[in-house]
Image (cartoon, rainbow, N blue to C red):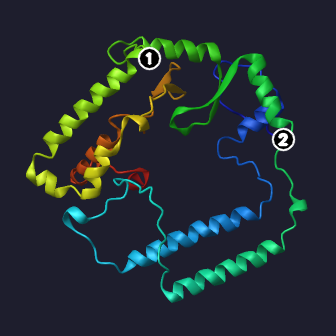
């Protein structure tokens, strides 16, 4: 049998069993134990989605400030009971639920077989701790990479020393920084919505969305890296996810505004599907 391969730039000694496990890559899914309740819960979510879409399928399309933009809306925290869908839709869902229950009644949970030995994951954890290594996904989806922790820490500190990009901040100053940024965000939005044409183009839901993020919802982004295995000299690709930072909602709004303009340029692709 051909030996499995994974990215190992530092030539770390890896037991064959660990190599085989890591060669399964990120797409490997551990087989869960049989749970007859989970499909029923999932069907409830499916039923809700179908009813919602059925309700809005023939609804008049809203225009102007009343239109709905996916991704630029504030989810309501008020419980709401949706009315039933069309009778035909409800009958179809009832029939689907009945067939699902019948199928689950015939399931034998004792026949479950794991697709991963019970000692495999603990052995991986022991290997990482004993050898002081990390397993990280490589940049560009090239696979899993085994890296010494010392290299990862040193590379991270090297990048963080770039004062043109990063600034060391004491945690005691964080609240002051956030307060200042939120004030600047408020001033920026006031200036943006002072333009009548832009204000009229922005839906009510989007306007509420950009103002919605408050201090309690803000999370400080955490720095981490992906190894750039496609480079001649190994380096880390800095990642700072900012999904809940002061500027996050404004950034999404700006992206929404710019998307129609980007489509005017044939040399700017939208995604991988557009490239193919």
Q: Name the residue rendered at 67%, 77% in the picture.
A: 97
Whether 206 is drawn above or below 250: the answer is below
Residue 213 visible in rendering:
yes
Q: x, y (%) of residue 259?
A: 27, 51
Residue carrying label 1 = 171
Q: Secondary structure at mark 1?
A: helix
Residue carrying label 2 = 1
Q: x, y (%) of residue 126?
A: 80, 24
Mark 2 or 1: the one toward you: 1
Q: Mark 2 packing: few (<14 Cα in 10 Å), some, or many (20+)?
A: few
Going from N to C along the chain, the mark reached first, 2 or 1, is 2
Farthest right residue? 110
Q: Name the residue rendered at 55%, 39% in the picture.
A: 141
Q: x, y (%) of residue 57?
A: 39, 77
Farthest front residue? 78
Q: Quadrant of residue 106?
A: bottom right
**31 horizontally vs 228: left or right:** right
Q: Name the residue rendered at 16%, 43% in the picture.
A: 192
């Amino acid at each position: 049998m051909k030996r499995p391969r994974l990215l190992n730039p530092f030539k770390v000694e890896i037991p064959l069993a660990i190599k085989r496990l890591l060669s399964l890559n990120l797409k490997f899914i551990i087989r869960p134990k049989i749970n007859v309740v989970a499909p029923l819960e999932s069907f409830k979510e499916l039923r809700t989605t179908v009813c919602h879409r059925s309700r809005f399928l023939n609804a008049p399309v809203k225009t102007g400030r009343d239109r709905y933009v996916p991704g630029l809306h504030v989810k309501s925290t008020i419980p709401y009971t949706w009315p039933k869908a069309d009778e035909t839709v409800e009958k179809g869902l009832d029939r689907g639920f009945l067939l699902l229950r019948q199928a689950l009644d015939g399931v034998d949970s004792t026949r479950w077989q794991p697709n991963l030995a019970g000692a495999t994951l603990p052995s991986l954890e022991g290997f990482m701790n004993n050898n002081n290594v990390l397993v990280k996904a490589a940049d560009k989806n090239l696979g899993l990479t085994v890296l010494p922790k010392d290299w990862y820490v040193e590379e991270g500190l090297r990048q963080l020393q770039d004062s043109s990009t990063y600034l060391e901040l004491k945690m005691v100053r964080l609240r002051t920084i956030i307060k200042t940024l939120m004030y600047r965000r408020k001033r920026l939005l006031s200036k943006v919505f002072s333009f009548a044409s832009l204000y009229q183009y922005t839906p009510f839901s989007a306007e509420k969305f950009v103002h919605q993020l408050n201090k309690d919802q803000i999370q400080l982004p955490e720095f981490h890296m992906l190894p750039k295995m496609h480079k001649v000299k190994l380096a880390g690709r800095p990642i700072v996810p900012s999904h809940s930072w002061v500027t996050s909602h404004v950034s999404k709004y700006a992206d929404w505004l710019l998307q129609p303009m980007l489509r005017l340029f044939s040399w700017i692709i939208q995604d991988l599907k557009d490239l193919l």
